[in-house]
Image: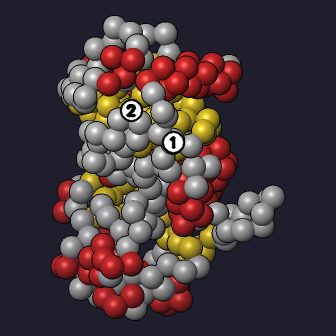
Amino acid sequence: MIVFRDPSEVPAGFGPSVVAIGKFDGVHSGHRAVIDRARVDALRLADGARVVAVTFDRNPLALLRPEICPQSLVGVEQKLRLLADAGADATLMLTFDRALADLGAREFVEHVLVGALGVRIVMVGADFRFGRGGAGNPALLRELGPEFGFEVHVVDDVRAIDAGRRVSSTWVRELLDAGDVAGAARLLGRPHAVRGEVVHGLKRGRELGFPTANLSPDLEGFVPAEGVYAGWLVDEGMPGDAASTPRSSVRYPAAISIGTNPTFDDVDVRQVEAYVLDETDLDLYGHTVEVEFVSRIRGMVAFEDVDTLIAQIADDIVRVRSELT
């Protein structure tokens, strides 16, 4: 997938394109339905049209209303990978700064969608807003379409069959906050994951016989509720290594802990650490890894002594193994 960080990076004559616009936070099943629809429309145009996702490097609320801005489900690099997996041919990752926030709706259409991308079809959700003060909406896009030569398709919401509720990033966050990673996976269409560098910790796990890979606190992705989870650790290698490409990454079954080590009470902030099953000599320090959550085993509790904790960890591993097989 081609990635552009600014409209000026798009080469002349790049279009025609089918453009899907949105925050794409989490790239959940609703977002992927939009990309799927865009791919169908691109084939219908039959003139080499490309599917382009136009999105932002942060939630616009982070600039406009930071006091109510929710935490993002994924980081920028995660979002780019997920959009590529969903089938986008290119992504224009716009920096949402004051200049972009002040750009008028018509100017956004003329300079970004038409001028840079040569748009033929624009795909948005019914509640999509854009341009200075949120003045742009699907109705305005339809007004501008004939002038600039593009169609507008408003994509219906995707609803969960069992709940009848609209699939949304807000709903995914609610589930993750409750530790329901399995429920979140149903909405996402894949396991939720966090991604970051493996750093040195207190080596408490190694002392207990279960060495863990500790992720840096500045990891990408929404961290679920405290507890112990079954999941996978995907080793992408050192930055710049051949192993950093998805094709050559290594995937390990893992028991994942999120919390502050309440038994020892020696960690100030929540940390994500993963014990790779049956591996005690892996050297992952400095590697970029992605930790995928499959199911929650239990909540996080403080144990009365180390022996009780070790026995519980051993039981956790048995349950994790069962969940992953």
In the rendered view, would you say 115 is above or below 88? below
- Where does residue 117 sit, x and y in percent of width and height? 34, 64
Residue that mark 1 sits on: 300
Identify which residue is drawn at 74% across, 60% down.
160
Q: Quadrant of residue 35?
A: bottom right
In the rendered view, would you say 7 is above or below 322? below
Out of 48 and 225, give the one closest to the viewer: 225
**Tag 1 and tag 2, C-beta contact below 8 Å:** no
Can residue 165 be seen in the rendering of this structure? yes
- Where does residue 24 sit, x and y in percent of width and height? 46, 60
Q: Nearer the viewer, mark 1 or mark 2?
A: 1
In the rendered view, would you say 71 is above or below 324? below
Calculate the distance from the C-alpha at mark 1 to the C-alpha at mark 2.
13 Å
Q: Quadrant of residue 315?
A: top right
Secondary structure at numbered mark 1: loop
Outermost residue toward the front in this view = 304
Identify which residue is drawn at 38% across, 9% down.
280
Disc nearer the start of the sequence (1/2) = 2
Instruction: Check disc 1 and give the amino acid type.
Output: Met
Residue that mark 2 sits on: 273
State the quadrant of the C terminus. top right
Q: Is residue 95 left or right of residue 236?
A: left
Q: Is residue 108 left or right of residue 229?
A: left
Can residue 109 be seen in the rendering of this structure? no
Out of 278 and 265, give the one closest to the viewer: 265
- Where does residue 306 sit, x and y in percent of width and height? 43, 24
Instruction: Check disc 2 and give the amino acid type.
Output: Glu
Q: Is residue 264 left or right of residue 191?
A: left
In the rendered view, would you say 96 is above or below 135? above
